[in-house]
């Protein structure tokens, strides 16, 4: 039986009784839970595939945007409360990596840490100094989104779709700009990093800085592509995640 708050925040793409390990996915800035809709088909059938539903988009269009990235993490950690009875692995891309990390810290503080944290396409919190600010005029924000994902140009060219999509992007960019980062208490779980080899937002060396946020092990996988490498390289990414999830499941069962 799931709670109302869990249903509000979590979208399930696969989650049956046999899924004791659950992959919880966190979208990028301006992104939607549905970005992960194809992942269940590429992961083992005993892995639950869930995604976080940020406010202000898709079927939460009328819900107010969060006031800060850390308050967003507070709300998500609260919503995941019942799910922590299971083995959780968190995956976040870009802004979602920071949100997933902050949620992992809150779950650890509650005595129910995730089994692993997977971070993608984002600098670690202690290495955010000097990052470019994302917020700007609407036209500047649209140009930035299209620079990374040309397929979104058609969305912003349609006045009706632009009115629906742009507010979430604008709000998320503000969250990213206002997030202070800095040193955080270390996690104990393993951390797995992913990035594209030509990502203009983060280098592989910067991604290796995620090793500093845990007492556990760290491993980085670099795939071909830019900031949204995970779309054309979805098969390779999910094959690697399948190995990670299998390792995490066997390790925690043996513990």
Image (tube, rainbow, N blue to C red):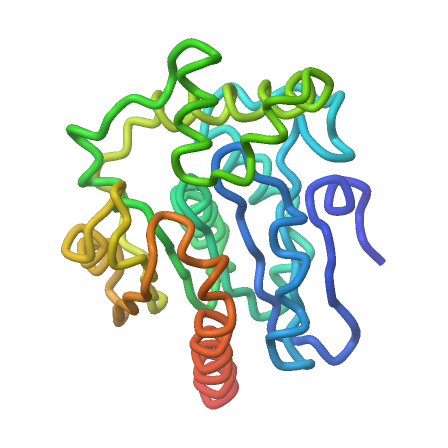
- In the rendered structure, the answer to whether residue 16 lies left or right of residue 117 reads right
Residue at the outermost right position: 1
Q: Position of residue 82 (x, y in %)?
A: 69, 56
Question: Quick one: quadrant of the N terminus?
Answer: bottom right
Q: In this picture, is 134 found above or below 219?
A: above
- In the rendered structure, the answer to whether residue 80 lies left or right of residue 172 reads right
Query: Which residue is painted at 25% across and 53% down in the image?
Result: 198
Question: Quick one: quadrant of the C terminus?
Answer: bottom left
Query: Which residue is painted at 50% across and 19% down in the image?
Result: 170
Q: Position of residue 154 (x, y in %)?
A: 61, 31
Give residue 15's quadrant in the image. Answer: bottom right
Q: Where is residue 160 in the image (x, y as percent from the top left)?
A: 73, 18
- Nearer to me, 72 or 55: 55
Q: In this picture, is 248 found above or below 102?
A: below
Query: Which residue is painted at 28% across and 66% down in the image?
Result: 222
- In the rendered structure, the answer to whether residue 87 lies left or right of residue 226 reads right
- Nearer to me, 8 or 122: 122
Q: Where is residue 64 in the image (x, y as percent from the top left)?
A: 66, 19
Query: Which residue is painted at 55% across and 65% down in the image?
Result: 88
- Nearer to me, 96 or 132: 132
Give residue 8's quadrant in the image. Answer: top right
- Nearer to me, 83 or 226: 226
Give residue 50's quadrant in the image. Answer: bottom right
Labels in figure, total:
0
């Amino acid at each position: 039986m799931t709670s109302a708050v869990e249903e509000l925040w979590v979208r399930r793409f696969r989650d049956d009784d046999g899924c004791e390990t659950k992959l919880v996915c966190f979208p990028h800035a301006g992104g939607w839970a549905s970005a992960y809709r194809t992942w269940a088909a590429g992961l083992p059938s005993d892995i639950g595939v869930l995604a976080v539903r940020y406010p202000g988009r898709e079927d939460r269009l009328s819900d107010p945007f969060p006031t800060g990235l850390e308050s967003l993490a507070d709300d998500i950690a609260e919503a995941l409360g019942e799910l922590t009875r299971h083995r959780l692995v968190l995956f976040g891309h870009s802004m979602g990596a920071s949100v997933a990390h902050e949620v992992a810290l809150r779950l650890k503080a509650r005595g129910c840490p995730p089994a692993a944290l997977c971070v993608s396409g984002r600098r670690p919190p202690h290495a955010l100094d000097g990052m470019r600010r994302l917020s700007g005029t609407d036209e500047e924000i649209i140009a930035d989104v299209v620079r990374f994902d040309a397929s979104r140009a058609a969305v912003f060219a349609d006045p009706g779709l632009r009115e629906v999509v742009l507010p979430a992007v604008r709000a998320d960019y503000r969250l990213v700009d206002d997030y202070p980062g800095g040193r955080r208490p270390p996690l104990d779980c393993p951390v797995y990093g992913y990035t594209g080899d030509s990502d203009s937002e983060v280098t592989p060396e910067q991604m290796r800085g995620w090793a500093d946020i845990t007492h556990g092990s760290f491993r980085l996988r670099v795939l071909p592509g830019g900031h949204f490498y995970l779309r054309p390289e979805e098969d390779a990414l999910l094959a690697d995640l399948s190995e990670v999830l299998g390792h995490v499941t066997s390790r925690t069962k043996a513990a």
